[in-house]
Amino acid sequence: MRHFLDFERPIAELEGKIEELRHLSTDSGLNIAEEVGRLELQANRLLRQTYARLTPWQKVQVARHPERPHASAYMA
């Protein structure tokens, strides 16, 4: 499960809806690829807009993100 920061909550909700639709599509056999594609475009747009307007504190939060690689991952 991916860890989202507070300011990423709208993105997380949208990605959750996309996954839910994909799961529904495979279970029921419905073809909702167009809706999923539209939501993916919206999620990408929202992601770009969110990261384009980060406050200094949000940049610190991204730098300290728990899933960010650490130096020990590169020194193997």
Image (cartoon, rainbow, N blue to C red):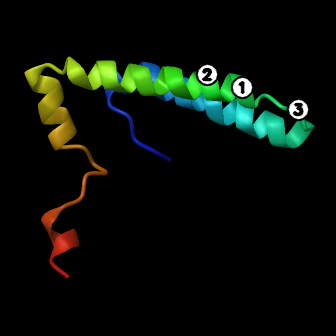
Instruction: Give the Cα separation between the discs numbered 2 and 3.
Output: 16 Å
Foreground tag (1 vs 3): 1
Q: Is residue 24 left or right of residue 34?
A: right
Residue 38's disc is 2
**Residue 24's x, y, as percent?**
80, 34
What residue sits 75% from the left and 39% below the top?
Answer: 23
Q: Secondary structure at mark 2?
A: helix
Which tag is nearer the camera, tag 2 or tag 3?
2
Alpha carbon distance from label 1 to label 2? 6 Å
- Quick check: marks 1 and 2 in contact, CB under 8 Å? yes
Element type at marker 3?
loop
**What is the spatial separation of the Cα atoms under label 1 and label 3, in whole angstroms?**
11 Å
Instruction: Write the residue at 24% across / 43% down.
Output: 65
Q: Position of residue 28 (x, y in %)?
A: 91, 36
Tag on residue 34? 1
Tell me where residue 63 appears, x and y as whole percent: 15, 42
